[in-house]
Amino acid sequence: MQQLALSSTALSIHEPSVSHVLSFIKNQSCFNTKHNYRMEIALFYRSLGKRAADVSLHDLLNYKDLLEERGLKLITIAKKLTVLRRLFTFLYQQGVIPTNPSAGLKLPKTSNETTREILSLAECNRLLTSIETKTIRGKRDKAIIALLLINGLRVCEIARANVGDLVRTEGCWVLRVRGKGGKNIDTRIRDDVRAVIQAYLKTRGKVQERDSLFVGTTHRAKDRIARRNVQHMVKVRLKNLGIDHPHVSTHSLRHSSITHLINSGASLIAAQDFARHVNPATTQRYFHNLERLKNHAVMMQPIRV
């Protein structure tokens, strides 16, 4: 298992509250979250050069301006500031700092990610059928994209999956998904999806349950596939189909999967379970967006071309 180095040296923090900062990071349930929080907090401390007890709302607003000047996207800035807001709230609740400087901090307004561009049903099917399966890479990529499009998996869930996570229970095949926050949820695997996964695993010979479900295909053939490699692979395959829009990303495949499922008649409860959303409000946004477009007032417009 990967180990995350959590130390004052790694964070470049030199202050009395460093142990509490490290505790805040260790308290996160997911390895990737711990890693991202450490990086964001270290960046903030290096930029500001102040102890936590001396940080003010004015400092956070100046940092926000600095991020904007660097040309970062609003959603990226919002994520960075969210980490800091959670950190200072934690330090304040622990009694480490006298006041919470982030109490009045407002995050940039970002667009609803469920409205980002998705693939049409025809494009989804075309993407899957375009992948040749004569090579190991082709077999692997088809299995990955099938899980992204048909099961709506996140890229991180693809990368974390082990061979032993694919099991048979209650008369059907499931993949035990290790999702956000370290929560494990079973998602049912259809026979056609399992078939392409098995076709890929056969090319790898004997595999152990603890082995990564998906690995590299070149000099890193035994290493767990990295998220960035999945993202690059999907981008390349979309581009080869002429789908090269800047707002279409790997995550768009998940949004496409959920959207087409709802269009096919899935209920809110079924869609929430499928998408593994903790909060039903997240799933509800998909229904709201689709309903808004279907019943858009422009359809009542009496003016005609």
Image (spheres, helix red, strand yellow):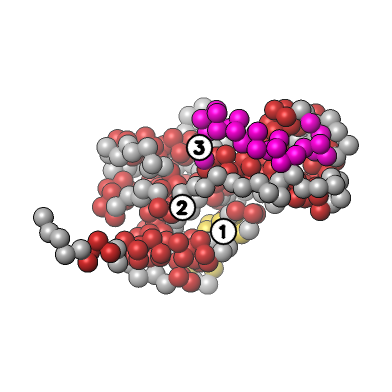
Measured as percent of width and height from the top left, residue 183 is found at 63, 58
Marks 2 and 1, how far apart at CA: 28 Å
Q: Is residue 147 visible to the viewer in this orientation of the structure?
A: no
Question: Label 3 amino acid?
Answer: Lys
Residues in magenta, as a range: 50-74
**What type of secondary structure mainly makes up the magenta span?**
helix
- Quarter of the picture containing the N terminus is top right
Instruction: Answer whether labels 2 and 3 touch (C-beta < 8 Å).
Output: no
**Of the numbered discs in the image, which one, if any, rests on residue 112?**
2
Q: CA distance from mark 2 to mark 3?
A: 14 Å
The three-letter amino acid code for the residue at tag 2 is Asn
> How far, Cα to Cα, is label 3 from label 1?
34 Å
Q: Which residue is mark 3?
A: 73
| Side (left or right) of 222 relative to 117 | right
Name the amino acid type tagged 1: Arg
Residue at 44% from the left image edge and 35% from the top image edge: 232
Q: Which of labels 2 and 1 is toward the front?
A: 2
Q: Are marks 3 and 1 in contact (CB under 8 Å)?
A: no
- Asked if one can make out residue 102 in the rendered structure from this viewpoint, the answer is yes
Q: Secondary structure at mark 2?
A: loop
Residue in the picture at 27% in, 37% down: 242
Which badge, 2 or 1, is on the more N-terminal residue? 2
The residue pinned by badge 1 equals 176
**Front-lying residue, 106 or 28:** 106
Q: Quadrant of the C terminus?
A: bottom left
The image shows residue 7 at horizontal and vertical percentages of: 80, 34
Of residues 293 and 139, the one drawn nearer to the viewer in this rendering: 293
